[in-house]
Image (cartoon, grey):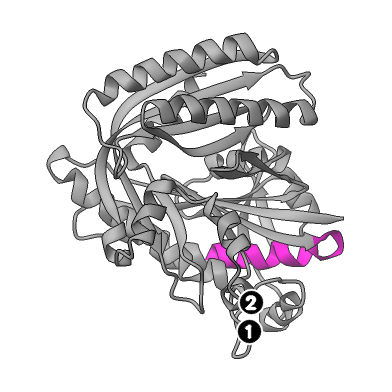
Amino acid sequence: MPKWFLCRSIVCKALWDESSYIMKTALYSISFIHFLCSSDVLCFGGDILNFTGDALLVLWKVERSQISDIITLAAKCSLEMQEQFGFSYTEVGPDLQLKIGLSAGHVSQLIVGDEMRQYLLVTGQQVDDVRLAQSLAQAREVILSPNCWELCDRDVLEAEMLKGQKAMKVGIFHPPDFDEHFEKCIDHLQHYPNDEVLLRNAVALASSHELELALRRFVLGNVLKKIDDNQPLEFVSELRLVTVVSVRLQFHESTKMTELCKLVQDATVSISGIMEGWRGKIIKISTFGKGCTFLCAFGLPGDKREEESTHALDSAISISNFCSKNLMKIENMSHILSVVFFFCSLVQCTVGTELPRLAGVWEKYSFILTSYRRSH
């Protein structure tokens, strides 16, 4: 049975003055996406699942018998990233700091939505574990979750336990011959570039109208319109002021996985319908334990309207009314409304050939959401 190996990294920003906020936000967004998408992550066979403000989630799919080797591979990848980008200084002042968490074990993939818009979610204890491991990391550190430490090759990795935690900080990496180890790992990897094979097989697939329609459901409609209008990729990227609504739903601990999936599906369809009525969009859905968070935005390209803040408040009230009446397993619900800068871009990776990826970046909002999570 396949296991999944997760890596999560985060970039922390120093404080900046509001007068230069826009330029610096764009700089950090583009720089972060570029060096992670075009460097070690893809070359080491990882799949970039999502980019959420200041964090990136990477996944390796492996069999149980291979997981120790892949943990070694991902640890090497993480340490190389820390060596190259652990502290990256920019001309505008603030520095980039990498904090990386690793976890390993079973996770589940869930697709929610309707025939117009769909979302891919990754859920499970290991998703929560990798977030916790990353949150425990300091700048330039790589932290292993307890389960990841149990499954790794301890002859290769040396680590020390964090004070008051079961997580481990990677200290020394010394495989007898990493080149030989890497060659062995290539056989386990689904995506690895060489002279004969593209990094992603999808780029070599024959044109298929049905496949295109299926994939379009996962891309934000506002961006699809620009692509359909044949706008150059450099013009698709845009930084703008939007109104954000974050909806956090916490369900009872007794909720079974099948029930949780249906609850998230019902909430997605209903929240999407409510948002569309006010020209808003669901940007991202993330899961945690027995709960989920919906990140929604008003004022995206083509959707700019007056009184967006009022519409955001009205939508939050409508969502609250729906969830309290129709989601029977709900235990707690909270909302955050904020006006933030939003950067949306299609990124062409420079390593091999990579399909463009959609990346929504909420720089300032990331701090708000982090504070919100800790206070609830």
Give the residue type at disc 2: Tyr
Residue 56 can be seen in this image: no
Residue 347 can be seen in this image: yes
Specify the quadrant of the image occupied by residue 110: top right
Give the residue type at disc 1: Val
Which residue is at the front of the view, 54 or 260?
A: 260
Q: Which numbered disc, 2 or 1, marks the residue that appears first in the sequence?
A: 2
Vertical placement of residue 49 versus 175, above or below: above
Vertical placement of residue 333 versus 27, above or below: above
Q: Can you give x and y, in whole percent of width and height, for residue 106 in the image?
A: 78, 47
Majority secondary structure of the magenta segment? helix
**Residue that protrudes farthest toward the left in the picture:** 19
Horizontally, residue 168 falls left or right of residue 315, namely right
Identify the secondary structure beneath mark 2. Answer: loop
Q: Can you give x and y, in whole percent of width and height, for residue 335 in the image?
A: 45, 19
Horizontally, residue 362 falls left or right of residue 7, namely left
Find out whether residue 65 is within the magenta segment.
yes
Q: Which residues are magenta?
A: 63-79
Q: Which residue is mark 2?
A: 192
Specify the quadrant of the image occupied by residue 117: top right
Q: CA distance from mark 2 to mark 1?
A: 8 Å
Residue 197, numbered label: 1
Which residue is at the front of the view, 226 or 57?
A: 226
Foreground disc of the pair 2, 1? 1
Q: Can you give x and y, in whole percent of width and height, for residue 304 in the image?
A: 26, 36
Q: Can you give x and y, in whole percent of width and height, for residue 271 in the image?
A: 52, 26
Residue at 65% x, 72% y is 191
Residue at 61% x, 71% y is 202
Q: Are marks 2 and 1 in contact (CB under 8 Å)?
A: yes
Residue at 40% x, 37% y is 366
Identify the secondary structure beneath mark 1. Answer: loop
